[in-house]
Each structure stands twice: as C-alpha cells, then as structure tokens.
C-alpha cells in the first residue's frame, strides 16, 4: 500500500497511532481523582459527594459528567438493604409527640433524637447499639454498645451525650416507644437533667427519621460489608466508624457538605 501511494512506511504507521484528545485526557485525570476519593471513602461516597470534592479541589466539572465517568468505570457507592427486626405486637401506650416531625434547629443541644439498632456477630449473636444524635450538627454525641437490649444500654448512651454536651434545661429528646425509652429509669434520668421527652407514634418511623437515617448509613457503609467475629471486634469497628469516619470525616449534603464536627466547631466559634 505504501508503495502504491508513494508514502513512507513511517508516515503510514504514525497515522495508525491515535492521539489522546484534550477531552479524553481530562476524563482520564478526573477518573484518577474519582478513584482516589472513592478509595479514601472506602467506597461510601457516590457521585454527588465526589462531585463536591472535585469542585473543592479546583476541578471544573458537572455532576452528570462525574456520573458518566463513574458509570463507565464501574464505580458505585456501596449500598445494601438494612436488616429490619420483627415488630413488637404487644400493646403500646401512646405518649406525647413534642417534636411532631419538626427537625429544624437553630443551635446545638436544642433537639436530640435516639434509637437502638441491631449488630450481628458470629460468636456473640445479636448485639445492640444505642445512639443519640444532635439534629443541628447531625453528630453522634453519645452511644453505647451491649450484648443485651436493656434500659442500662440507653441510659449509658444518654449519660455519655449529657456529660460531653452539657445541655441547658429545655432540650427535647425524641425516641420511639420502645420499653427501654419508656421505662421508669429512663424517664427519671430525663427529669433529673430537665430534658423534655418526645415519642414517636406507634408504627411511624418517619417521626424519628433522622436517627433512622444514621442507622441506615451505618448499615450501608459499614455493617453489611463486614463479618464481625465477636462483640469486641464489632465494638472496635463501630467506634472507628462513628468517631473516626462519620463524625469527623464524612461530609453531609444536608450540612452543605461539611462534617458534623465542623458544624459543631463553627457553632462554638460563632457563639
């Protein structure tokens, strides 16, 4: 062919080499950054958070472009459906719902929400995590992990939150109607701290949607991707997730892509 066209062979072979376009080069560099962010988040970040961090790092890129690059490279956020325990069929006495699904706040330690979730281990079976979340910062301010689901479990989480946050009288604490939260011991502890109790309606998880959301994040980003050998290994992993990741490193769309700790720090600095 080269002889017929009177063309040097070097020119022919050079024509076969495809040069990388500016767009392809940009996509390659973006993919490298996306992979780095995805790895650092242990696969927990999807396109919206990765897009925000790219913009923060100085990249000019649209969310749709990030989504296309991620989809083409097979990069996805880890999501697994959470475990839902059987519902309690015993009669439950309704109590006052002070919060009424009003999750808005203007300051720290104005409204807290609390709940219990289940964590499975190979040797010790089901264990239980009680958490307390501040609605202003979305920070887990108190938690407790135990082999049994008792009043002491939720009391320990509450005392942990109170000792760290030092709330003033009038704080609202919203929970479901579980026996641990409606117990005399827990009610007395709230009275002593001058905390106003609020309770979800029976069978209405939306009344406590914010703490349900945290437990969903915990399951999708950590628990369902790990097999815990025993109570001790699960306890260590939960501490790392809550304190090492969720509170201090995980950015939240509802917090304008800040971490809970950053929001708390900013509040104290402006006070």
Image (cartoon, rainbow, N blue to C red):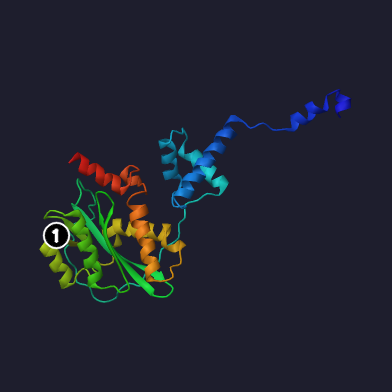
Decide which of 156, 135 is in the foreground and name it.
156
Image vertical order of residue 161 relative to residue 259, above or below: below
Q: Which quadrant holds the C terminus?
A: top left
SS at circle 1:
strand
Q: Residue at x 29, y 58 (%)?
A: 211
> For this view, does 196 lie left or right of residue 78?
left
| Residues packed near mark 1 inside 10 Å, few (<14), some (14 to 19) or many (20 plus) | some
Q: Residue at x 25, y 44 (%)?
A: 265
Q: Which quadrant holds the N terminus?
A: top right
Q: Residue furthest right?
A: 4
Number of marks = 1
> For this view, does 10 lie left or right of residue 91?
right
From the top left corner, tell me how far across and down residue 35 is, in percent. Answer: 51, 45
> For this view, does 112 lie left or right of residue 213?
left
**Residue 240 location, quadrant:** bottom left
* Residue linked to disc 1: 196
From the top left corner, tell me how far across and down residue 163 is, in percent. Answer: 19, 58
Q: Residue furthest bottom?
A: 90
From the top left corner, tell me how far across and down residue 220 is, in percent. Answer: 42, 58
From the top left corner, tell me how far across and down residue 170 is, in percent. Answer: 12, 55
Image vertical order of residue 94 relative to residue 68, above or below: below
Q: Is residue 84 visible?
A: no
**Residue 128 location, quadrant:** bottom left
């Amino acid at each position: 062919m080269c002889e017929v066209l009177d063309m040097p062979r070097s020119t022919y072979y050079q024509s076969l080499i495809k040069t990388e376009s500016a767009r392809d080069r940009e996509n390659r560099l973006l993919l490298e950054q996306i992979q780095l962010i995805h790895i650092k988040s242990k696969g927990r970040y999807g396109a919206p958070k990765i897009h925000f961090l790219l913009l923060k790092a100085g990249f000019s890129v649209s969310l749709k472009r990030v989504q296309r690059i991620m989809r083409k490279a097979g990069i996805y956020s880890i999501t697994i459906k959470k475990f839902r325990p059987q519902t309690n069929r015993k009669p439950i006495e309704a109590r006052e719902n002070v919060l009424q699904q009003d999750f808005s706040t203007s300051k720290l330690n104005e409204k807290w929400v609390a709940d219990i979730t289940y964590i499975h281990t190979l040797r010790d079976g089901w264990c239980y995590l009680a958490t307390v979340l501040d609605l202003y910062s979305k920070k887990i301010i108190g938690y407790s992990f135990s082999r049994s689901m008792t009043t002491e479990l939720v009391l320990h989480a509450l005392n942990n939150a109170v000792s760290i946050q030092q709330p003033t009288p009038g704080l609202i604490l919203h929970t479901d109607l579980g026996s641990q939260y409606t117990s005399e011991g827990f009610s007395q502890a709230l009275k002593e701290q001058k905390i106003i109790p609020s309770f979800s309606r029976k069978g209405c998880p939306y009344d406590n949607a914010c703490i349900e959301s945290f437990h969903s994040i915990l399951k999708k980003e950590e628990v369902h991707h790990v097999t815990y050998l025993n109570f001790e290994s699960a306890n260590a992993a939960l501490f790392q997730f809550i304190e090492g990741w969720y509170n201090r490193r995980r950015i939240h769309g509802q917090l304008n892509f800040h971490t809970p700790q950053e929001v708390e720090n900013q509040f104290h600095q402006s006070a």
